[in-house]
Image (spheres, rainbow, N blue to C red):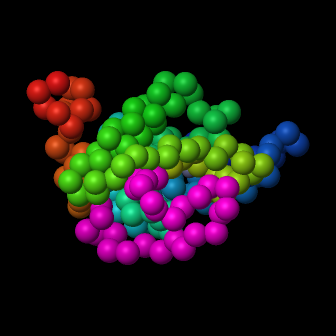
Amino acid sequence: MPASLKSLPSRTADSGTDSPLRRRVRRVSDCVFCRIVAGAAPAHRVYEDDTVTAFLDIRPITRGHTLVIPKRHATDLSELDAETGVDLFRVGHRIARAVQGPGFAADGANLLVNDGKAAFQTVAHVHLHVIPRSHGDKFRFATGLVLRRSREPERVAAALRADLAALDPRTGSADDTA
Ligand code: 5GP
Ligand code: ZN
């Protein structure tokens, strides 16, 4: 097991009050997103800092669909401290700005957290979806069914990294005169 996984708190969810999602993650090494943080599972990473990392969704809803996660395991929002929540949104905000750069030319983005099984959370490690949107794209939250297949993830991740790097580091604005 990688050293960085060993250093994470091990979860032995044996309390009767645990949610089904929490019960499924009995050890952090069971969590695919913790394995990505530790470098023990592959991902097309586009951003990383001390508290947060971001990588492409394996089944993107739209091109550049990215997940922003806390590096420290938190199953759902009830386990996430508010400061890390701020960090998640700060990075999600930045990615939402970046996808409007030349590599994507998106017209907008949906930022979304599915918190808990009732809200269709399927991976038991908090994640903020950043879903680039374009005028006329086919995705509708309400109607659901959509073809989700990863195409050229290396190229997509490289374009997103380039658009992130092009943002003004101080303001997060695409206009470096701001
Ligand atoms: P949820 O429904 O929990 O909000 O979304 C979980 C997301 O994680 C889904 O969009 C799914 O495609 C993505 N996902 C699940 N497993 C993996 C994985 O191993 N790697 C990556 N990059 N994404 C994953
Ligand atoms: Zn985890």
**Residue appearing at x 17%, y 24% in the figure:** 178
**Residue appearing at x 59%, y 58% in the figure:** 140
- Foreground residue among 42 and 1: 42
Give the image quarter of residue 154: bottom left
What residue span does the magenta drawing correspond to? 131-157
Residue 141: within the magenta?
yes
**Residue appearing at x 40%, y 56% in the figure:** 134
- Foreground residue among 49 and 27: 49
As drawn, 97 above or below 132? above
Residue 140: within the magenta?
yes
As drawn, 49 above or below 2? above
Q: Provide residue 125's location: percent of width, then percent of height.
A: 59, 49
Q: Provide residue 55's location: percent of width, then percent of height.
A: 39, 56
Given the current orientation, which residue lies at the most extreme right position? Answer: 16
As drawn, 174 above or below 32? above
Residue 62 is left or right of residue 177, and the answer is: right
Q: Provide residue 153's location: percent of width, then percent of height.
A: 34, 69
Residue 6 visible in image: no
**Residue appearing at x 54%, y 74% in the figure:** 147
Residue 25 is left or right of residue 54, and the answer is: right
